Image: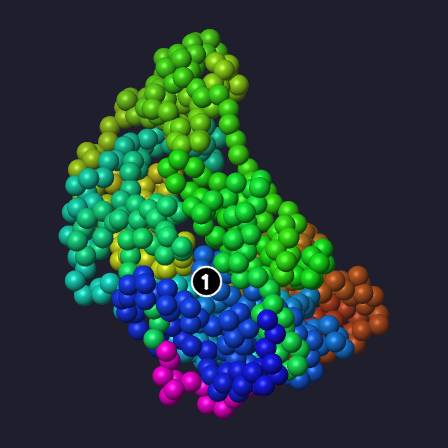
Amino acid sequence: MKKSIAAIIAITLTFSTMQALPCSVYAVTETSQSSAAEEQKSELTQEEQMKKALTAVKSKITIPESYSDFSYSTDNRNNLSSYSFTWTNPADNRSYSARVTGDMITSYSHPDRYKYTNKPSVSSQKSSYFVNKAMSWVYKVNPSMKGFLKKSDVNINLFSDSVSVQFERTYSGIKVNNNRVNVSLDKKTGEVLSYNCSWWQGAEFAESAEVLSQDEIKEIYCGEVSIKPYYRIYKDTETGKKKTSIVYTPQNSFIYNALSGEHSTREADYEKYMDTDSYDNGIALDTVVETEEAVAEEDMAEGGVSFTEQELAAAEELASMLTSAQFKEIVLKDKYMGVTEKYMMSNFSIRKNENAKCGYAISCDMRINNKNESRNVDITADAKSGRIMSFYSYDSSSKEISVKKANSIADEALKYYFGDISGEYRADSENTAPLKSKGKYKETSREFVYNRYANNIQVSQNYIIITVTGSGKVSSVRSCHDRNVDFGDGLVISKETALELLCKQQDMTLGYNGFLDLTSNPHTYLEYTMPDWTLNAVNGKLCDYYGKETVSAAKTSDSCPYTDIADSPYKKEIEALYEHNVRIFDGNKFNPDEKITRNEMNKLLDILTGYGYEPMPLNDNAAGNTASKDGGYLTRMELAKEFTRAAGIENVAKYSSIFKSPFTDVKDNDKNIGYAALAYGMGAVDGGKDGKFYPNAYVTREYAYHCAYGFIVNSSGE
């Protein structure tokens, strides 16, 4: 029903003083389901909810008046409403957009978000500048995030006009998995170009003060984990012959409650909360109902926002469309869909649709998932009348296998096809596992796996797999069998020793995990997990898949880690390139005076050209007037030639008669004057204060980076 103009103005004035309500200002209280029903009666109308979301955006983000064309869409996914707003400039069709989910702004994009370049450029700011700008902006639009963000990554790319900053969510210093914030900023101005987040709203977390120690949780883990040795086969790079190693790997994994050391209930809880029978009218049957206290007046935004005529009209139009509850009543009466009261509405959205009579269509998913039935119905309907435009549901059925019969057929096929090697293979225990049929799902075929063994140790990646269908037919056979392999004596350290050595080398990971149930209510768990591991079964050291010892990678830093460049005249250029991910030297030593190798220079040029550089053949590179006879290094004149090649102008450099030398030690008639003059002209090389180029001098690492920086700055026109 349309509201009067006076009522609209009244609502506008009411919401003009409101701020987006951050989840942190809500207190969780317990109420009965009857009182919850009364609360539902007093919920805001669709029009009022949309205005509340608009207020959240417009009170914190400035939308210029020239962006006057307004459009929207709304979603209700698992009882969590969201509104997507777009403001378009009719003059150039560029737009701002924002999304409000629940009580948070969860995404935003600026008209300049798509800024691409084919020229490299460097920023005058360090990574810390962009981190601070991004964090300040996020705290402004979502104050409830303050104190819970930790920078996880910064990416300043030579070939992008934007900088990407990622944050992870933490609580008491512990990471909350699957909760993150991504922000993109203009590389020159620091203005936010885009933002999105994944954030469990209203989540509560167990306190971490009483968590078990590493020693305590490792003792529990080692007491129940099963480990098994495997042969790994690899090819020696020098001889080309096959070699073997033996490794231990875990056969099971555990997730522990970090406070008690018992197995976490998260996975079991997830299964329970994914069962639609656990809910009644969208409320979990075995949980209390959470309600939100009204935000205090002092927490509201200072100053008001005003709505445009288009925004008011859109909110009023939304009020005339069906609610999710009204639409479900229509679906329940449908003759062919087969949707009953037990089905849950997992998604409900309203978007523009030219095929809908009113111009907007409802997209809706009706879902049932329990031990007897699993079915989804996807529906599209007119947003005002509810007239069904389309629906889709998938059901399957087929003949179920007989495990005993199918296993016998597979055993016979193994001997038939692989009689000469079948004695080396053992049937996997899963071959005779009970039927996996559940509810309406029927196991209609099975893969029977046979693994190779040597010295009573399983050989990785050596297998025979035979598929048998419910009709008793072999539908596929495949195998992998390495021949001519020496497996040695198979002697390994004991499993007890292996676990003892593992615990000395690797800690378990502590973190918050969780999920959203079908009503978008977050369930969180403080857990310990053991990261994936492989242990060399002969020497007991952590190793890669093939048994080679692994060395923990040094943690990458956003700021330049080199400790030996303080006295380098090119310190700032080296630091700037590092922050732009130009990182061809590992560790904390740069060795600025050391000669740079050709391979290192090729890597550097490859990065500067966007990974499109083709190295110059060595015999073609040796500039005629250089003293370089060492293919491992290059002279300054050779460097000039490399830069002209990288810039795509090496053919121009061959017309030596048209160039005048910028250096006192390179003559105008030098056959390589074109390379030196062009490289100098584009800022890629320079000389000393004495005006000399020193063309025969070897290029040092610091000079190479200095030249690379000049090449980038001049290429970008800065």
The verdict on residue 612 being magenta is no
Hey, what amino acid is under mark 1? Answer: Leu
Q: Position of residue 40 (x, y in %)?
A: 41, 67
Q: Residue at x 19, y 60 (%)?
A: 211
Magenta segment boundaries in residue numbering:
294-307
In-image side of 283 versus 697 (left or right): left
Secondary element at image label 1: strand
Q: Residue at x 19, y 39 (%)?
A: 224
Q: Quadrant of the C terminus?
A: bottom right
The residue nearer to you, when weighing 425 against 105, is: 105
In-image side of 69 versus 134 (left or right): right
Residue 650: tell me if it is visible.
Answer: yes
Q: Residue furthest bottom?
A: 303
Q: Position of residue 711 (x, y in %)?
A: 65, 72
Q: Quadrant of the N terminus?
A: bottom right
User: Residue at label 1?
Assistant: 80
The residue nearer to you, when weighing 415 against 104, is: 104
